[in-house]
Structure formats: structure tokens, C-alpha cells
Amino acid sequence: AEIKERAAAGGGSVQCMELDLSDLSSVRRFGEEFRRGHSELYALVNNAGIMALPKRQESKDGFERQFAVNHLGHFELTKQLWPLLEKSEDARLVSVSSDAHFIAAGDADPLSDWNSEKDYQPWGAYGRSKLFNILFAKEIARREGDKAKVSACAIHPGVVKTELGRSYFVPPEACNSIGSVECTGSLSPPEQLGLLALAPVMLYSAKTPAQGAMTQVKCAAAQGIGPSINGKYLRDCAVGDTAPIANDAELAGRLWALSEKLTGSPFKVGSA
């Protein structure tokens, strides 16, 4: 309600629609409904995500939950809305990734256990999903080529004071006191001590939600920057470096093919 009021005060409007990124059928229903009600889409920010679930969970479709929500759901959502993005002038696609993708930098092949069935590591699965966000943006840009209709990029928002860490950092018994909507995390005693030692630094350096949103808002809305951010990774509103593996075109192509297979339909972009 507050968001709607603030939008109205600025001459805009907000429409709320149901979407569950962990359920591909929900993503498709959303896509169909959105296309019926809209003829254009100037910016799509794939921002939703979950982080470091302590125990392996599966989505409704049987995929490891971080892979399902952070990558595959966004892949299908983008596929569903791509026709509208292509119709819109200077359209933008922003994938919210993270410097946590560096966690996956040492993987010989991040796709060898993409569903975390052999060995589930909370941070390893999260790091891979954030790597996949970058590979997805870069593969979009590669497939579109020099005459891109949609500028696609990935960004790192920074460490932000939100509930993203609720599944890992907050003991379940404390969930109600902080008003968390979903909190199942737990830390071992050594981890609790480590977090306690780091807490002052994290709290001091962490961004507010408004600060954390600045890079994706700039990428989605700033005029005339599309070509300069296409296929790039940004942090603090500027192009930044990635782990070398994030530039692996062969890996990006295999991820795209796997994603098409898992979602059950091709995703046609450019002439690729």
C-alpha cells in the first residue's frame, strides 16, 4: 500500500501480480497474463533471490531451490517477456548477481552438479547461481550481436541491509522478534562467534536498501547508457571485474542449452 501511495504521489502507478519463481508453471501464467495486459516493456530487473539455504531444498519442479529461484525462474521469466522487451525502444535487462560468484571461480565445471545432488554446499550453490546470472546476461548480449534491441547486464548491489541472509544468519528462535516472513537458518557455535566478530564491520559497511538499489536502477532507467553496459558486470554504478570463469562463452552456451531443456522450450534471441 505504501509503495502504491508513493508511486501515485509521483504521477505513476504500481500493479501487483502473483509470481513464484520457484514454480515454472507460475512463471508461465504470469508471463501470459502480463503479455495480455501490456504491449511493451522497457526494463526487466531480475532481482529476486534466496541465499545459502542451510539444507538442500527442491522446487516444485524438482530443482535445487537456489538454482530454481536465482537462475532458472528468471531465465523462464525473461523468455516469457522477451517479445515485449524487443518491441520497446532502448529496453534493458538487468540481472542482479553478486560478487559471491567468485565462490564458484574454482569449480572445474560449475554445471557438473548444477542440481547439487552429489554434494550440497549452501554457499557453493549460491555462488554458482550468481555466476549463472552473469553468464546469462553475457550470453543474451552475445546472441543479440552488434544490433542489440535489448541491453543486458549483470550487477553486484553490494552488502545490503535486507533479509536476504535470513535463511542462514538468523537462528530460528529469533525470527519472530525481527519480523522475518521466512527464516529457517541456523549457525554452529563457531560460525556464531565468527559472525559476532564480523558483525560490526558488516553493519558499518552495509548499504541501505536505497543505496543497494542504485546500480540496478541506473542500469534499468538511465538514458543513453544501453550500449555501454550491454554484456557488462557493474558494481557501484560502474563496470567492474568478474572472475575469469564468468567470461567463459562455452560454459554460457551450455548453461543456456540446459536451461532451455529444463524449462521445456527454446529461447530465441537474435540470430543465434
Image: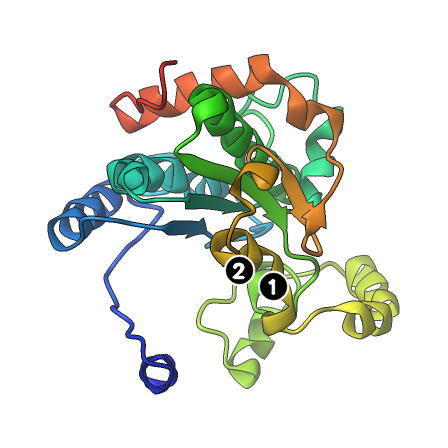
Q: List the residue tagged with mark 2.
A: 217
Q: Residue furthest left?
A: 36
Can residue 118 be seen in this snapshot? yes
For numbered disc 2, what is the local secondary structure?
helix
Q: CA distance from mark 2 to mark 1?
A: 5 Å
Q: Is residue 232 left or right of residue 201?
A: left
Q: Residue furthest right?
A: 197
Can residue 115 be seen in this snapshot? no
Q: Taking 90 as reference, is 50 above or below it?
A: below
Q: Is residue 185 left or right of residue 268?
A: right
Look at the numbered discs 2 and 1 and tell me whether their residues touch, using CB distance below 8 Å. Answer: yes
Please identify the quarter of the rendering in which residue 16 is found. bottom left
Task: Give how far across and how far down residue 86 sits, in percent.
Answer: 31, 36
Q: Is residue 26 left or right of residue 248?
A: left
Say what amino acid the circle numbered 1 marks.
Answer: Met
Q: Residue at x 55, y 36 (%)?
A: 230
Please identify the quarter of the rendering in which residue 174 is found. bottom right
Q: Residue at x 56, y 24 (%)?
A: 118
Q: Taking 90 as reference, is 37 above or below it?
A: below
Q: Which quadrant is the C terminus positioned in?
A: top left
- In depth, the one of 30 and 189 nearer the eye is 30
Label 2 CA crowd tier, 10 Å (few <14, some 14–19, many 20+) = some
Q: List the residue tagged with mark 1.
A: 214
Q: Residue at x 33, y 19 (%)?
A: 261
For numbered disc 1, what is the local secondary structure?
helix
Q: Residue at x 59, y 40 (%)?
A: 229
